[in-house]
Amino acid sequence: MISSLRRTALTLADLVFPPSCVACGQPGALFCDACAQAVAPIPQPCCPRCGQPQAGAALCASCVSRVDDPIAMARAVALFAEPLRPAIHALKYANQPQLAPLLGRYLVAALASPAWQNQIIDVVIPVPLHADRLASRGYNQSALLARHLCHALRLPLEPDWLVRHRDTRPQVGLTLEQRDVNVHDSFTAQLGMAGKRVLLIDDVYTTGATLRACAAAARDAGAAAIYGLTLARPLLQPHMHDPLTI
Ligand SMILES: [Zn+2]
Ligand SMILES: [Zn+2]
């Protein structure tokens, strides 16, 4: 009853204040069809472990230098570029949780792609926010994306199996190395994931530091295999000592 009332209220609000596209401003839809079709997939080939686009199919330099990577395979669906970038920004910072199903459908399509066909996933876990940030934002955008994915593909969702117990400083302006240090030991994992093959979901993969910190916690809790899927990643090959502006 409450949800149908809420649906009705949303419909009336849409009639009175029709949404406009968060990327191009065109009235009619929150993320219009033209923008949805303009989302740019990650160029191939890419590093088989972290998904970084590159010339060949060997491990990239970062993955070669990282001897103990807890993530077996990470992939992003699309480039962190127009029109996806403003849509993710609106989902995270402009109180537009309604964008989650519109963007989550890209995750659904990605999991059906050949890259994922041989991976068995027992449970899907979104990258958690710290409780303080969750309280101020009102929702965890990665959890909303994961919920859409799990609903569409009938996968088990466990949004509470990872907890962010330390609110780290923002990663913007930190180098690749500093980012790993910044988020290290920020997460704890529930023991329920022992023996499970886990898919972590996040919105943006920049250096992978956050996903790796989550994966390390999951591995400590006994997860059998850990994968990562994000909506977007920028087209960059980060150097260890360059401060990153995103
Ligand atoms: Zn648009
Ligand atoms: Zn790599």
Image: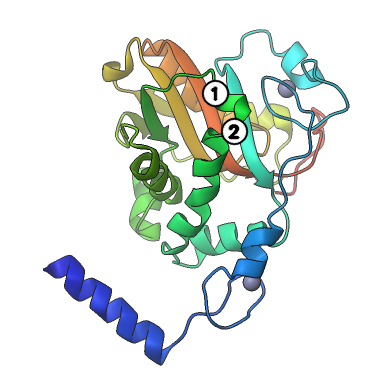
* x then y, percent, for residue 51: 70, 29
Q: Please state which amino acid type lies under the numbered disc 2.
A: Ser
Badge 2 residue CB within 8 Å of ligand 2 = no
Q: Secondary structure at mark 1?
A: loop
Q: How many marks?
A: 2
Where 5 falls versus 233 (above or below)? below
Report if the CB atoms under discs 2 and 1 are less than 8 Å apart. Answer: yes
Q: Pointer 2: residues within 10 angstroms few (<14), some, or many (20+)?
A: few
Which residue is found at the position 56% from the left and 26% from the top? 116
Q: How is the image coloured?
A: rainbow
Which residue is found at the position 56% from the left and 68% from the top? 31
Q: Secondary structure at mark 2?
A: loop
* x then y, percent, for residue 30: 52, 72
* x then y, percent, for residue 174: 70, 39
Q: CA distance from mark 2 to mark 1?
A: 7 Å
Where 15 falls versus 58 (above or below)? below
* x then y, percent, for residue 64: 76, 12
Q: Nearer the viewer, residue 61 or 81?
A: 81
Please tell me in which quarter of the rendered image ligand 2 is found. Answer: top right
- Residue wearing tag 1: 117
Say whether residue 184 is visible. no
Where 161 falls versus 107 (above or below)? above
Which of the numbered marks, if any, corresponds to residue 113?
2
